[in-house]
Amino acid sequence: MTPISANTLSALTASNASATPVSKSVASEAIIDRALITRVKFNDDRNAFAELVRRHQSLLRASIRKMTNGQIELSDDVAQETFILAWKNIKQFRHEARFSTWLYRIAFNVWQSEVRKKHEVLLDSETMPEPEPVPPESAHTSTKHDLDRAMEVLNDAERSAILQCYYNDLSHDEAAYVLGIPLGTVKTNILKAKEKMRAKLGAYEEQKQ
Amino acid sequence: MNMIRDSLDEMLKADAQMHRDQYIDDAGFTLRTIDALPAPRAGRHVSRAVRIGMPFGLALLATLFVTFFAGGKNFFIDVTMDLATETVTRDVVALALIGAALFVVVLANMVNDK
């Protein structure tokens, strides 16, 4: 693999930092990630890894917050553990998936072991603390509230499938990789989840009328 | 109900887009994470295959060593007799060295695993 100098990488990262999120192309993001990962793999470069953390922390923490039903402290602990495991195992990362997808996979496994450790049942509202209040946004808030309530009827597997495919914007194949389940199971879980959510949303609509 | 059937996908996509667009400020998260990373290992990393092979290789060398010094005698019975009579012979020293070497290799492996 052609080594990439620190200067080239800094230039790439700097130009990327000035770009708006919309203008960032997936390809250039992947190139920068790859260069940083190479530095971490071959030089144990902590600065490069710090850059990776900075680049991915927001999306990962948001995703985990959704997974933990809005528990900010817990989700940050899970996110930190995810990055530590990524650091320890980065030599096993073969670029078969995007780095972010690999992180989602680790995060999901960390969260699952956390749930097992605490003997909690995911989405059991009796055992889960109340989500932290979200400031009102707009007319979207009502819809969002309905969606959140509709998602409460989903079981762990269905909720995880919706989270990966919609909120993490992954393909069904990528979701199967993250969740460690067959592709067919992901599709089935999505279908079941949507059916349940439609039923729940339908009930809300009737209540409103 | 039909409207919900048609719009659920759109609702989910719109909510997911808002979720992704919401930037979570780093606020020291990266620094805390980097501080929590395990320290780099001192010295050169030895692969698992080499670490497993080391005790076996040493055992093979020890066997050759013992065969060479025993000169056709029964090494272990002789050493046992020497130890029982508290006599320090060349064979006893050889066995002690082999034992110490194996101990060091096993200890090194345990440290490396941690």
Image: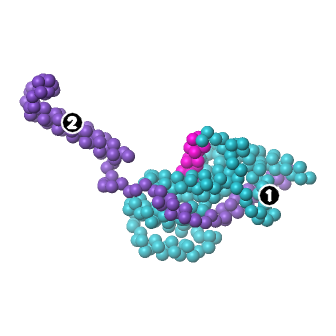
The colour with which the image depicts chain B is purple
Residue at 55% x, 73% y: name it. A17
Mark 1 packing: few (<14 Cα in 10 Å), some, or many (20+)?
some
Percent x, y for residue A202?
A: 84, 49
Q: Secondary structure at mark 2?
A: helix
Q: Nearer the viewer, mark 2 or mark 1?
A: 2
Residue at 45% x, 56% y: name it. B37
Q: Height in image: B69 above or below A20?
A: above
Mark 2 = which residue?
A: B99
Q: Which mark is residue A143?
A: 1
Q: Which residues are magenta?
A: A103-117
The colour with which the image depicts chain A is cyan
Residue sticking out furthest to the right? A209
Asked whether the residues under marks 2 and 1 belong to the same chain, the reply is no
Percent x, y for residue A122?
A: 66, 44
Q: Chain of mark 1?
A: A
Q: Main secondary structure of the magenta part?
A: helix
Which sits in the foreground, B84 or B96? Answer: B84
Q: Secondary structure at mark 1?
A: helix
Query: For residue A196, what is the image quadrant?
Result: top right
The answer to whether A67 appears left or right of A143 in the picture is: left
Is B50 colored magenta in this rendering?
A: no
Residue sticking out furthest to the front? B86
Disc 1 residue type (three-letter): Thr
Residue at 62% x, 70% y: name it. A21
Residue at 53% x, 55% y: name it. A80
The answer to whether B92 appears left or right of A86 in the picture is: left
| C-alpha span from label 2 to label 1 | 73 Å
Disc 2 residue type (three-letter): Gly
Percent x, y for residue A125?
A: 72, 44
